[in-house]
Image (tube, rainbow, N blue to C red):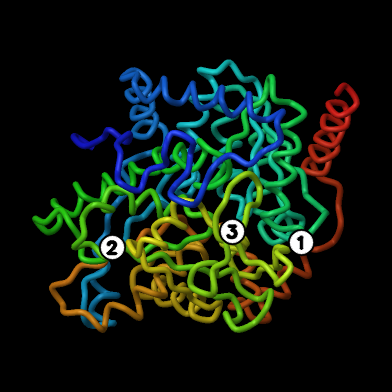
Amino acid sequence: MKKNTNIFFATPYDADAQGHFGNFGGRYVPENLMPALLELERAYEAVKKDPAFLEELMDLYKNYSGRPTPLYHAKNLSTHLGGAQIYIKNEGMNLTGAHKINHALGQALLAKRMGKKRVIAETGAGQHGLAVATVAAKFGFECIVYMGEVDYERQRPNVFWMEQLGACVVPVTHGTKRLKDAVTAAIQDWITHVSDSYYLLGSALGPHPYPSIVRDFQTIVGLEVREQLKEHTGRELPDVVVACVGGGSNSIGIFNTFLEEESVQLIGVEAGGRGIDTIGEHATRLAHNPQLGVVEGYKSYFLQNADGQIQPTHSISAGLDYAGIGPEHGLLYQKGRVQYVSATDTEVLDAFQLLAKKEGLFPALESAHAVAHAMKLAPTLPKEKVIVVNMSGRGDKDLFILGEVFGGENWQDYLKRKSTPSSSRTEILDLDCQRQMSLRLEIK
C-alpha cells in the first residue's frame, strides 16, 4: 500500500470516551479488571499517536504477513451467475490463512510496548488462536489458547498447528463447549494473571477498548480494497460490500473505510445454521429478533430466551457459532447503515463448492456465508455493478467438516485406517501444557 495506510481515523459510528457506541458497548467487568482495561486504554491511545508504532506494524503486515492481500475479479463466477461483477478480497492469503493475523500483530506489538510476558486468547474456528500462537512465537510470549471442546474436536488441524508453535491449547468443557465458553475461560485466566498477561481478544467485541482496537487493526482490509479497486476498475468505491459476521472483526475491518460513503451498500451475513425459525440451531442475532443484553463485559445484541439466558447456537462454521455480536455492529444495525442477513448451512456448502469449481478458491466456511449471499445478490443487479466479498479466510482448516459432507466412502475409509490410537509428540505436548496450567494455578 502506497497511501491511505493510517488505520486510525474516526467515523460518526465510533465509541465515545466511555466506550459506548450509542446504546452499545461499555465496560461491564469485575472491579479487579478495571485497572487492566484502563492501562490498556492508555497504552492504545499512546501508540495511536506514535508514527513509529504504525511504521513497525505496516512493516510486519508487508514483510511478515504478506500484505496487501489480493483483490481478485471472479470473472467465471460472475459470468455463471449473471448480473454484477464479483471481486474477492482474499484474506486467506495472509500468513496464517485468515484476517485474524491483522489484529494479532497489532495487539502483540501493543503487549510488547506494555511489557507483558504472556498472551491469553480464545478461539472458535482456530484461526484467531493460530494467529495468536504465531505472533507469540515471533515475539517470545508464553501463549495460552482456550477453545470450546466442540470446536477443539472439529477444528483439530488448527489445534495441531497451534501446538507446534508452542501454544498451550486448553479445551473448555463447561457450558455449551463453544466459543462463548472459551471467552469466559480466557477472561477468568486474565483476572488471575493481570500483571504479566495480555488478553489478545479475537473479535470486535468485549469491554472497551477492545472493539475499537480490533476494528482499527482490521481497517487495513478496507483501505486496501479502495486502492485495489481503483487499479482494477478506475473507481474507488464498490456498489456493495459483503462480509460474514460472527463477533464481527473481518466485517467491521472492511466496512469501516466505507461507513461514510452512503452510496456503498454494506451487508453482513450471519449464520442461519439449520434455519432461523428453530431454537438453538442458528446464530443470527440481528437478522432474527435481536435482543439487548450484557454479556462478557459489553452491551449488545445476544440470542436469549424469555428469561434472558443465552441460548445455544449452531453453525457449520465454528467462527460464526456465537450468541453475541460486537457493539459497533449493534449501532450500525440500529442506525440502518448495515443490512444484516443470514445464510443456512446448506447454502454455505453450495457456495463453497461453486467458488471452488468456478474460481479454484477454497473459502473458509465462515467466508462462504458471504459468498452465498453474493451468489443470491449478483443476478439481481446490472452487470456494471461491483460487489466486493471479503473472503476472510481459506478452507484448509475445515477439511474434516467438508470431508464428512463431500468425501464419500473413500474419505470414511481413510479416516478409519488412520484412527488407530498411538502415542504421539502432540500427546506429550498436551500433557506438558496441562502441567504448566496446573502449576500456574497452584502458584496463584
Mark 3 vs mark 2: which is more N-terminal?
3
* Picture residue at 75% right of the left edge, 38% below the top: 188
Circles 2 and 1, Cβ within 8 Å, touching? The answer is no
Tell me the tag on residue 176.
Answer: 1
Asked where in the image residue 238 lies, by quadrant, the reply is bottom left
Asked if 139 appears above or below 98 in the picture, the reply is above
Q: Image quarter for residue 193?
A: top right
Disc on res. 324: 3
Residue 359 percent location from the top left of the image:
34, 69
Q: Position of residue 274 (x, y in %)?
A: 61, 80
User: Closer to the camera, 143 or 334?
Assistant: 334
Position of the N terminus by quadrant: top left
Q: Quadrant of residue 235?
A: bottom left
> x and y percent of residue 178 in the render?
71, 58
Nearer-the-camera pick, 104 or 299: 299
Task: Decide: few, some or many residues near mark 2? Use Cα within 10 Å; few <14, some 14-19, many ≥20.
Answer: many
Kind of residue at badge 1: Thr
Q: Are the residues at dot 3 and dot 1 in contact (C-beta closer than 8 Å)?
A: no
User: Disc 2 vs disc 1: which is toward the camera?
Assistant: 1
Q: Which of the pair 380/361 is nearer the observer?
A: 380
Q: Secondary structure at mark 2?
A: strand
The type of residue carrying mark 2 is: Val
Q: Position of residue 228 (x, y in %)?
A: 20, 50
Q: CA distance from mark 3 to mark 2?
A: 25 Å
> 27 or 381, which is in the foreground?
27
